[in-house]
Amino acid sequence: MSTWIETDRGSVVVRTRGRVPVSGRIPVRGTLVCAGIVVLTLAVTLLALMLGSVVYSPAEVFTAVFGEAPRSVELFVVQWRLPRALAAAVFGALLGMAGGLFQGITRNPLGSPDIIGFTAGASAGGVAVVAFIGSGYFLVAGGALTGGLVVAALVMLLSRGGGVSGFRLVIVGIGLSAMLVSLESWFILTADLELAQVAALWSAGSLNGTSFTFTGPALVTGCLALVLVGALMSRRLTLLDLGDDMSASLGVPPERTRLMAMVSGVVLVAIVTAAAGPISFVALAAPHIGRRLAGASGTALGPATCAGSFILASADLLSQHAIPDHTLPVGVVTVAIGGLYLMTLLVRENRKGTL
């Protein structure tokens, strides 16, 4: 068996000759960007474990996580702070990948589950379950997934004729989002007072009170989903970027690929929404940031996933420590920052004539 490496337009092509030939292309800049973002995310996660009402040194944090530390240090770092820090990183990665999937299939800078309405559908389904049935993770996950899939079907039906990549899809999604927000408010107003308070807090998008008991299933499911969706969709979306005819000629049916990507994106959003509520604008911003940093012209799921992880981890750290003695829902921070980003994006794309 022999292996050799070639370079081609900023990529490293690895080929192995043997009984089972293997060939793969590794984008150098994209790989370095992902590695850099991962390092930054780890640094933010370390800060999240260090800071709080009691501040610990990096050495104390590492001892608590990987070794034996005093009971008080282990309580603060491992049991209270670590679940939230991990949830922020993993959920951000899920939202980043979901945004990359939707922008890849719509070929629209506003092609995000937040804008198209899938996040609102998952949120409305989750709120309905919390308000009228219960707040167990799998119950809420089922409601969020059902809501997201129903909205996806409605968006596809109502935007028929404009194509998945058409601007009509975005307009239909915005309209459905407005209707779903009203429906969600009605669910909260008609529910039992105690359940309504839980549903209202959940609908803001919050990582407060995160624990391995409740969030553990979401973290495990989310990590598996990242691996499976990434392995399944990366090559398909790369070929789809070449055009429908080229994609079909290479054995990747474009319509089936778009349907698979849409369902995958809804599942990723539902996993996050069920555990933390609707967290907006991460899925919109992460693909843009990842694509710019990586210098990619098409779909770049890896950089989008890493950027989403860093964005949500940073936003959650800010939500905990921006205002002394007050902890904000992370959704409030992402909406505040994401609103500014959305306005900037609209102005820039309008000047380019892509909207």
Image (tube, grey):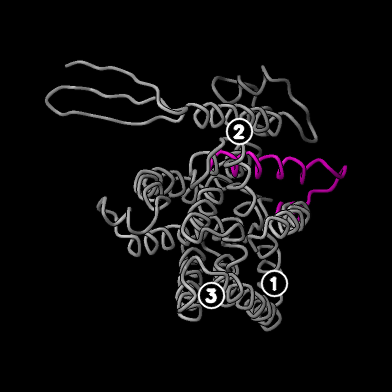
Image quadrant containing the C terminus: bottom right
N-terminal of the pair, mark 2 or mark 1, is 2
Residue in the image at 58% along x and 76% along y: 172
Few, some or many C-alpha atoms within 10 Å of disc 3 (few <14, some 14-19, many ≥20)?
few
CA separation, marks 3 and 1?
12 Å
Residue in the image at 39% along x and 42% along y: 227
N-terminal of the pair, mark 3 or mark 1, is 3
Disc 3 residue type (three-letter): Ile
Residue 324 left/right relative to 327: right
Q: Which mark is on residue 78?
A: 2
* Pointer 3 residue: 133
* Pointer 1 residue: 194
Secondary-structure class at tag 1: helix
Disc 2 residue type (three-letter): Val
Q: Are marks 3 and 2 in contact (CB under 8 Å)?
A: no
Name the one closer to the observer, 291 or 241: 241
Q: Is residue 258 above or below residue 132?
A: above
Q: Position of residue 37 (x, y in %)?
A: 60, 32
Q: Position of residue 252 (x, y in %)?
A: 29, 54
Name the one closer to the observer, 307 or 319: 307
Q: Tell me the quarter of the picture where residue 65 sits.
A: top right
Where does the magenta region start and end?
Answer: 305-333
